[in-house]
Image (cartoon, rainbow, N blue to C red):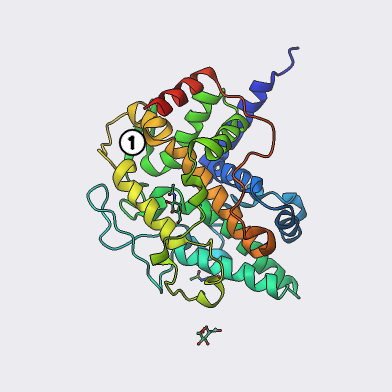
Amino acid sequence: MRLLSVSSVAAASVVALFSLTQVQAYGTLGHTLTGQLGQKFLTPETARQIEAILDPSYEGLLSKAAPWPDTIKGFSRYKWASVLHYVNSPGDNPPDRCVSTYDFAGLDIVNGLFNMTATMKHFKDQPPTTTGEASILRDALRFFVHFVGDIHQPLHDSGKDRGGNDAPIKFGKTKSNLHSMWDTLIITKDIKDRFGNDPKAYLDDTLSLAGQYWKPESLNWTDCDAANFNVQNPWSNTTNNIKKLCPIEWARTMNALDCTYVWKDYSPTRDYSTDYFKQVTGPASQFLVQKLLAMSGIRMAAVLNEIYDPADASSVPEIVKRDESPKLSPRYLRLLEDALAH
Ligand SMILES: *[C@@H]1O[C@H](CO)[C@@H](O)[C@H](O)[C@H]1NC(C)=O
Ligand SMILES: *[C@@H]1O[C@H](CO)[C@@H](O)[C@H](O)[C@H]1NC(C)=O
Ligand SMILES: *[C@@H]1O[C@H](CO)[C@@H](O)[C@H](O)[C@H]1NC(C)=O
């Protein structure tokens, strides 16, 4: 009997993740990755407090917390949350016109993020005293990490064709839709093509891009545009003190990508696994798909640090990889060199 090689173990774990995502509606793989990225930027104190909030089976891992909100979508107890995974602005019609307006009374992902952040901050200041309160807090943390991931998937910020769910596409031999393609197909193919099916190599590469290639822009990912700082929301009394929470700005910039990349030249008969895939995963877009994952991770960690470890979090989160250097494939190094040369 042959022993399994390391890479086939990694491949099997991608396959396992991938088949999970087909059972559940939305991307378990993407949420796992954003959680793993976020974890890298938590201060030790924040990580400790998060571990204490989550069920012990999560082992303190954001990557285990992040996919949960998609698994409870059918439960009547959580019906209130089903509309909080996305935002649709009136008049938005990519690729011709991208519009993102904040609705104070909206039941959407922007308000969902304000709500969950305010809930976490409330219980940070007044710790839960009943199991009911502890459960509200645990849910708020899991929804928060999930919503930060979702808001960085541009199709969660546009209502056109139900966020692209009703926009059929071809992806090689696979028939899918624009939304699922952005949730999972693109990420899965990128990991397979460039990283030998090893999600860890993909993560390491994304971290290294954040620390080098996307700098200095990445240092600003946790800032808000001053014009959007003081917009009131129903949770303002709490959230206005959390400076790195910028969901209005996040939704606006992600929605703009629906015009520049996501919906551009849409056609149901186009094969999205060729030039389109290359554009959104390669240097032509500054490795956009990885960039969105990195932004989610860094932003979720920045807000969590601000709530749970405010003394340490006052500095910009350190955009430096905390473990050994990633191994880059020769093919990827060539791409990177090309991009830097132009
Ligand atoms: C805010 O969160 C609570 C649960 O903590 C939920 O009952 C309520 O419906 C949420 N409202 C909005 C607008 O997100
Ligand atoms: C980052 O933010 C600072 C201050 O807001 C600004 O001066 C600078 O131009 C920004 N840098 C980039 C690369 O966006
Ligand atoms: C929130 O702040 C405003 C202005 O500071 C105050 O009038 C209002 O009572 C506060 N609301 C709550 C619920 O604390």
Which amino acid is tagged 1? Ile
| Image-based side of 175 in relation to 20, left or right | left
| Image-based side of 287 in relation to 319, left or right | left
Which percent across, then down, holds residue 199? 59, 32
- Between 341 and 206, the one lying in front of the other is 341
Height in image: 58 above or below 198?
Answer: below
Can see residue 27? no
Can see residue 303? yes
Height in image: 143 above or below 230?
Answer: above
Which percent across, then down, holds residue 129? 76, 75
**Which residue is found at the position 45% from the left and 23% from the top?**
337
**Which residue is found at the position 46% from the left and 50% from the top?**
152
Which percent across, then down, holds residue 335? 44, 23
| Image-based side of 115 in relation to 98, left or right | right
Which percent across, then down, holds residue 206? 55, 36
Residue receiving disc 1: 169
